[in-house]
Amino acid sequence: MEIGESSESPEGKKKSKSKTPRKPKDSVLKQKSPAEFFADNKNIAGFDNPGKCLYTTVRELVENALDSAESISKLPIVEITIEEIVRSKFNSMIGLAEHERVDEELYDDFESAKAREKRLAKEARIQEIQAKNANLGKKVKEPVASKAMKGRGETSYYRVTCKDNGKGMPHDDIPNMFGRVLSGTKYGLKQTRGKFGLGAKMALIWSKMSTGLPIEITSSMKGQNYTSFCRLDIDIHRNIPHIHVHEKQDKKERWHGAEIQIVIEGNWTTYRSKILHYMRQMAVITPYAEFLFRFLSDAPDKNVTVKFARRTDIMPPVPLETKYHPSAVDLLLIKRLIAETSKQNLLQFLQHEFVNISKSHAERLIGEMGPDFSHKMLVKSLTSQQIVRIHQLFRQAKFDDPSGDCLSPAGEYNLRLGIIKELHPDMVATYSGSAQVFEGHPFLVEAGVSVGGKDVKQGVNIFRFANRIPLLFEQGADVVTRTALKRINWNSYKINQAQDKIGVFVSIVSTKIPFKGTGKEYIGDDISEIAAAVKTSIQQCCTQLKSKILKRIQAREQQERKRNLSKYIPNVTGAIYDVLKEMSHLHASKRKRYTNEDAEVLNKVSNHIITRETLGEKLAQHVEQVDYEMALEYATQSGVNEEPRENIYIQTLEGESKFVDFQSPVFVFRLFQ
Amino acid sequence: MADKKKRRRPADPDSDSIPFKSRLKPDSVILQALKALAAAESTPSASTNPLTLADLSLSQACREVSDLPLSSVQSTIESLVLSLTHSILSGQGLSFSVPSRSSANQLYVPELDRIVLKDKSSLRPYANVSTVRKTTITARILQLIHQLCLKNIHVTKRDLFYTDVKLFQDQTQSDAVLDDVSCILGCTRSSLNVIAAEKGVVVGRLIFSDNGDLIDCTKMGMGGKAIPPNIDRVGDMQSDALFILLVEKDAAYIRLAEDRFYNRFPCIIITAKGQPDVATRLFLRKLKTELKVPVLALVDSDPYGLKILSVYGCGSKNMSYDSANLTTPDIKWLGIRPSDLDKYNIPEQCRLPMTEQDIKTGKDLLEEDFVKKNPGWVEELNLMVKTKQKAEIQALSSFGFQYLSEVYLPLKLQQEDWL
């Protein structure tokens, strides 16, 4: 959850961002609030169109919920509900009377006489073709129901509710956490899902733009005997919350966490699969969480309820906040660190505000900075020129790489579980690399490769995760996609890139993910450190799989060997017999002499004692014997090594249940009623 | 290319504009040089007998095949089939011992200047999943060859493939096994009576008989005479040519044939239109040994040009078991050599940058023995890899379509500029 932080005022960020895209038409200088800027450029945060808005809203709420639960080391339970509100219901909700269309031609979806003629002609033609096909006995396809008019008409309104069992929010902070863009708790240097303090606020801005309805927040923290309820919207021009209700209510149940409800315009039909994919991939990367996803609408057949059950109790550790690495800072950042530091002199500042600078190292650095610098000089008294000098030295000097201790990867175990749980693959291999560094930020790549499974398409299916969030859009340019499709030679691992159902899972965690573009949707292919790490991780998985696949091929060969060997018996004996026959003719006509043993064979051929069949039988006997020997050999070889066993997770049962035990000396069979 | 036919310009006044044309001496002077070359070629070869593998006492046993008459091919197949029959009847199944044709089993013999096979061979048993198909195909091919022997006819590789498409599946499989069978039987592929389709052509001062018909290659029109696939029916070669000109490309060949280059400088022009086939290589060898004239090669200035040269010269890897009959020793590299690019001021737009693959091939070639033994070639190849530029024969057309036949080649011959 994001809490308003006074020290991190939005002004600094706002200036640089709001200036760039604006080109004042007149000379009147205008100021823009951050909220206004993001309202104008909502695509930056992933709010491109109503469908994507619905998706991004769900995504932001789910990620906040997970962060909140994980921050108190609680196994997350997230319930997300999307409720469809048709236009008429929405109108009555806001108290708008339903209007009948009077002037039909005024509307975009009005069908002119000419268009209708065209459509009818087309339909008639289709029917004719179908009738013809039916006469010819061809399979008749179901006539495609002509879709309703596309476009604006199809968007509808949705109430999105997200409930978690996380930390909750302090009563007084709630308005600022939702009603002020660019305020948040996640600005420090650590691995987090969100980063900019935008998500929930953007959803609110979008709801204000599309429906005008406020957001409702219910929250309770551990140890609070009340529940905070808040209904608010945002004053976009001033970037401050506009509070409707903010009160403490009686706590009815023992619960801590937050429930957020928001009504927005969206498009379920076009983004349904994206949202479900997102939930599924989220379940893969966070198998320790429980998700309940529901979609409710007036039409019961459209309703969706998916429960992603928890499969493990093991949670990755909470990511630690870390200090900056000297090679990752810029001038502004140094100035800010100087302003915020509690250390007095330069030596202490260098030693304590950065990672990988020890005391002796700091002394050497100060010596290198030049005669203007000394250990004892006050850090706040540094001039701009001196700061530039420090920055330059940081750029040129060599520092040890930051350690990956501050990262919190999903973990090989969790990744593996997640893949098995959601895909049920035939085979899976996972690999976790060691931490590496890009521009002073540590990163860690984990990968999993699966073969087979349900609901997996043929070919390479790519699942990308950055800081444990699934990435769904802009797959083509992503480093993982490029690597998996272009730089992995699947054939050499006995995997058929076109035919097999391959799942490639790559999770990258870092204190700063180098996203490309504004939407935080993909990681560029131009960072050689990351590309190399991704490649090795996938290759490691493939190597593990290869031995399994080879074993399987061997097993299959065992089964098919006899068939394959027998298949060619008629061909080979036929060829040999044909030559023998020609020879026996020559022999009989005395045109060519053969010696005793060979002559005997040829005589038998001419007397039909040796025929095609006798040769075939003899060869079949030989094949049988060889097959038996090889099967025996295989059995002695493979009998020893068995697959390592894996622990399975059985979920704890909630509450008391009635059951009957069937006892036996080796096990208990428990029947629940 | 015929459409490029241009009217010959009458001794045009602006002939100075064509580079290097002025340096050409009269044809008679050039002919003098060529005659000296041809004379040098014909004398020593008469005195020294061509070396054979048996003459060398190599530490390793090597394998070579020889031309066998049809009857002995037949009897070899028959005794092989009989031994297979005995093996099957005794319950041992069947298996072939196939000489390995892989590059690990190849050896370059500098004394002979060609690649030969070492004596490694592998067993091809029937009762093994990985070899069962190949064994079956081998047996089938043997049977088909036996039929050819009985009927004494020739078929093409394609014909052979079509006799049992279901088993062979695609022609590369039957072709590969055909080469295996040559090795097993110890005979050349042509003695199996299996031929490849005609690919090479010849034109120029040559008269020979093909299956009894007398062919005059000066009267074969522009296209020339297709080189007959079964070399054993070629004979009675007569020629007054001073050299054989080996051309890599069809386009250059047509230029030379149309300009009747062979009438200006008596020669025989041969091309296989790219990688040479067996028939062309056999024909070239026959020409060289019977007529005793030098062979000059005109190939592209790129690694592949040199590779083609090497196939004529010391054999391809694929057919190394038969290198004795297929290779023509002592081919001289006339052009286009990397050093010619600057020597003849070939304009920048006609040169191509070498791709990474080209450069790699070039560097690999530098490691090959047949290049190393000729220091001149090493120098040229080094230059090519260093400048990273290649050029095709057609690059010379930038000075006019006939530059090749009217200036470049005569000048090269005049300067005796071959390696």
Image (cartoon, rainbow, N blue to C red):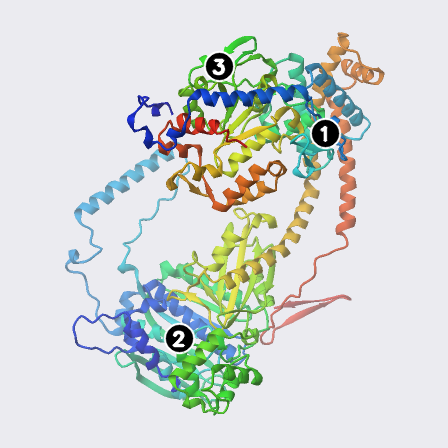
Instruction: Check contact, mark 3 vs mark 2: CB within 8 A.
Output: no
Residue B282 image point, x, y percent:
59, 22
Residue designated by label 3: B217
Q: Secondary structure at mark 1?
A: strand
Q: Is residue A532 left or right of residue B181?
A: left
Is tag 3's residue or tag 1's residue first in the polypeptide sequence? 1
What amino acid is found at the position of numbered circle 3 in the picture? Cys
Whether B96 is drawn above or below A603: the answer is below
**Nearer mark to the viewer, of 3 and 1:** 3
Judging from the image, mark 2 belongs to the subunit labelled A
Measure the C-alpha gap from mark 3 to mark 2.
Answer: 84 Å
Task: Give the side of residue A609 with respect to residue B203, left or right.
Answer: right
Q: Residues within 10 Å of mark 3 (few under 14, many from 20)?
A: many
Within-10-Å neighbours for mark 1: few <14, some 14–19, many 20+ = some
Foreground of the two, A109 or B348: B348
Q: Amino acid at mark 1?
A: Arg
A477 sits to left or right of A118: right
Tag 3 subunit: B
Q: Nearer the viewer, residue A315 or B71?
A: B71
For disc 2, the marked residue is: A196
